[in-house]
């Protein structure tokens, strides 16, 4: 097997935190790249996760994989999420990542997209607890104690529920935290996240439990903390739509009268600036940011017109012009 040429992670002495006032940014394939993680951290995310990265892709130095590990000093503490179905590859990937300076890892056992399930990875592991445990053990062995978490769903479907057994066995194997998105894999994003499972599991685990699922606003997150017994929450689609969700979360916990101060202009410009500073990959960033910026302005009276303008932008500088046109600087 070829030796990796991994990007080196910046030195980090920041530990993970699992408290109600330390919300996490979820792994988000196609979105939780370095610029977005930095944006969310600036707005109050305390821990961030990379998107899922193929352990095999890492081992074979697949060109699409290594850029996903781009990081910087401000991007700490960082959890690298891996997916795979072979303990050997997962262990090797963690060993190399540790050597390159990465400190924390997560095993994806929740992704139900066909591309991942076909490889017997992601949520497919929920149907094979022994294999899932072997994968987790291989990662834990290479990472050391306190460094590996597992992100699960309830099971493949109602007839195949793997909780709480699998979570408890993962804890016994040395997992340092469990993240639960309480839906079945077959559901995708349909129906509602069933928070009663969080409560059940929180009562049985001794390690921290992170809640994920249908946390579309900071109030959803705080309600979930109050009712589920989870240690902390992880924002996913809520953060994609509104990265201020993290500062709103802090404001609610601090019992401030108003949500945190939002400035759409500042948000859009900051995201553009971060992408310029840390270009995520060779892909066309103008096309990519058109969609991302449009999602930030959804719900505004000018959202449709702005979205149409973004759609027509072909050059990077045009994105700035559109922001200036629709969200002029305050006099
Ligand atoms: C666009 C998108 C990409 C995602 N990518 C990942 C991923 O790479 N790894 C993972 O474990 N979960 C992934 N998820 C699941 C989220 O991390 C989260 O668990 C899920 O969206 C439920 O939270 P929410 O309902 O608050 O969005 C993704 C979800 C979305 C919407």
Image (tube, helix red, strand yellow):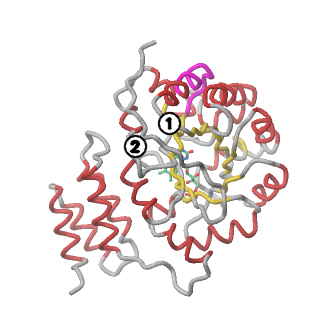
Q: Residues within 10 Å of mark 2 (few under 14, many from 20)?
A: many
Left or right of 144 in this view: 167 = right
Which residues lie in the magenta part? 83-93
Name the residue rendered at 23%, 61% in the picture.
311
Kind of element beneath mark 2: loop
Which residue lies under the disc numbered 2? 71
Write down the quadrant of residue 139 in the picture.
top right
Name the residue rendered at 52%, 55% in the picture.
25
> Could you give the CA–CA distance between mark 1 and mark 2, rounded to whole angstroms?
10 Å
Farthest right residue in view = 204
Which residue lies under the disc numbered 1? 102
Q: Is residue 111 magenta?
A: no
**Predominant secondary structure, magenta span:** helix
Where is residue 177 shown, x and y percent of the image? 69, 45
Where is residue 85 shown, x and y percent of the image? 60, 26
Name the residue rendered at 67%, 40% in the picture.
146
Contact between marks 1 and 2 (CB within 8 A): the answer is yes
Write down the quadrant of residue 226 in the picture.
bottom right
Residue 258 drawn above or below residue 324: below
Left or right of 208 in this view: 277 = left
Write down the quadrant of residue 298 in the picture.
bottom left
Residue 105 drawn above or below residue 154: above
Left or right of 314 in this view: 167 = right
């Amino acid at each position: 097997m070829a030796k990796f040429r991994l990007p080196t992670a910046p030195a980090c002495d920041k530990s993970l935190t699992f408290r109600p006032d330390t919300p996490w940014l979820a792994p988000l394939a196609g979105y939780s790249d370095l610029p977005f993680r930095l944006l969310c951290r600036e707005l109050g995310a305390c821990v961030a996760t990379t998107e899922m990265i193929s352990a095999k892709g890492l081992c074979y130095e697949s060109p699409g994989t290594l850029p996903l590990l781009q990081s910087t000093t401000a991007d700490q503490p960082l959890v690298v999420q891996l997916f795979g179905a072979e303990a050997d590859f997962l262990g090797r990937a963690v060993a190399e990542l540790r050597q390159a300076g990465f400190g924390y890892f997560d095993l994806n056992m929740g992704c139900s997209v066909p591309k991942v399930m076909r490889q017997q990875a992601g949520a497919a592991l929920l149907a094979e607890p022994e294999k899932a445990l072997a994968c987790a053990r291989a990662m834990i062995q290479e990472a050391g104690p306190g460094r590996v978490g597992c992100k699960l769903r309830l099971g493949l479907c109602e007839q195949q529920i793997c909780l709480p057994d699998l979570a408890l066995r993962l804890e016994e194997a040395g997992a340092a935290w469990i993240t639960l998105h309480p839906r079945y894999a077959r559901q995708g994003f349909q129906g509602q996240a069933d928070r009663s499972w969080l409560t059940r599991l929180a009562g049985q685990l001794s390690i921290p439990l992170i809640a994920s699922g249908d946390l579309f606003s900071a109030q959803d997150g705080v309600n979930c903390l109050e009712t589920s017994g989870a240690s902390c929450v992880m924002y996913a689609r809520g953060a994609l739509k509104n990265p201020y969700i993290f500062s709103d979360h802090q404001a609610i916990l601090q019992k401030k009268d108003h949500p945190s101060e939002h400035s759409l202009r500042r948000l859009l410009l900051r995201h553009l600036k971060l992408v310029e500073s840390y270009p995520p990959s060779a892909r066309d960033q103008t096309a990519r940011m058109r969609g991302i910026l449009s999602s930030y302005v959804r719900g505004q009276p000018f959202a449709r017109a702005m979205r149409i303008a973004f759609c027509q932008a072909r050059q990077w500088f045009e994105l700035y012009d559109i922001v200036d046109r629709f969200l002029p600087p305050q006099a």
